[in-house]
């Protein structure tokens, strides 16, 4: 290919690229025209701020009251009984309390824990 054909193909590509370019026109700042007074707009803003978020989920709306037929004391006693019973979903369910044999004195462990809580350093 000679240089003339390269130049012509380059000019053709430049013209095609220039034809595809479009610039957006600037119309200036949009002017707002309102029929309400400042006081009316402010009153609507205050009312909207106090009404809460209309588009939020239920979690942001606070505590909801549920009518229940069960008394609070019975629910509490059932919860305490469930907390004190064995966990049926645990790996060792039904095996009772696991015994752990240790060679460390309980008093020395307690002393180390208190020293660690106070920030003291013990020679171990």
Image (cartoon, grey):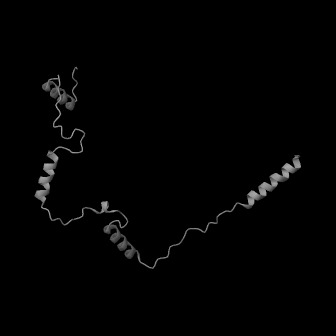
Residue beneath the point at 18% across and 40% down? 94
- Looking at the picture, tell me which residue is in the foreground, 93 or 3: 93
Of residues 32 and 111, the one drawn nearer to the viewer in this rendering: 111
In the rendered structure, the answer to whether residue 7 lies left or right of residue 43 reads right
Residue 106 against residue 70 in the figure, above or below: above
- Residue 8, given in percent of the width and then of the height, sits at 85, 53
Which is nearer the eye, 94 or 114? Answer: 94
* Residue 102, percent from left and from top: 17, 25
Rendered residue at 39%/74% (across/down): 41
In this view, the residue farthest toward the top is 123
For residue 40, what is the image quadrant? bottom left
In the rendered view, tell whether residue 120 sits above or below residue 41: above
Please indicate whether residue 120 sits to the left or right of residue 36 in the image.
left
Q: Residue at the far bottom: name it.
A: 35
Q: Is residue 88 above or below residue 8?
A: above
Q: Quadrant of residue 101?
A: top left
Q: Position of residue 25 (x, y in %)?
A: 64, 66
Side (left or right) of 78 relative to 59: left
Residue at the (15%, 65%) spot, across then down: 69
Q: Tag count in the figure?
A: 0
**Residue 67: x and y, percent?**
19, 66
| Up-down relation of residue 7 to residue 38 (above or below) | above
In which quadrant of the rendered image does the C terminus lie? top left
């Amino acid at each position: 290919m000679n240089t003339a054909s390269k130049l012509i193909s380059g000019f053709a590509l430049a013209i095609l690229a220039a034809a595809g370019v479009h610039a957006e026109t600037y119309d200036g700042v949009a002017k707002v025209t309102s029929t309400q007074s400042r006081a009316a707009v402010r009153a609507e803003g205050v009312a909207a701020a106090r009404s809460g978020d209309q588009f939020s989920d239920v979690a942001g709306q606070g505590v909801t009251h549920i009518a229940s037929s069960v008394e609070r004391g019975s629910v509490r006693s059932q919860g305490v009984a469930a907390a004190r019973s064995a966990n049926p979903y645990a790996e060792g369910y039904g095996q009772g309390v696991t015994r752990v044999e240790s060679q460390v004195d309980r008093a020395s462990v307690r002393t180390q824990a208190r020293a660690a809580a106070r920030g003291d350093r013990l020679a171990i």
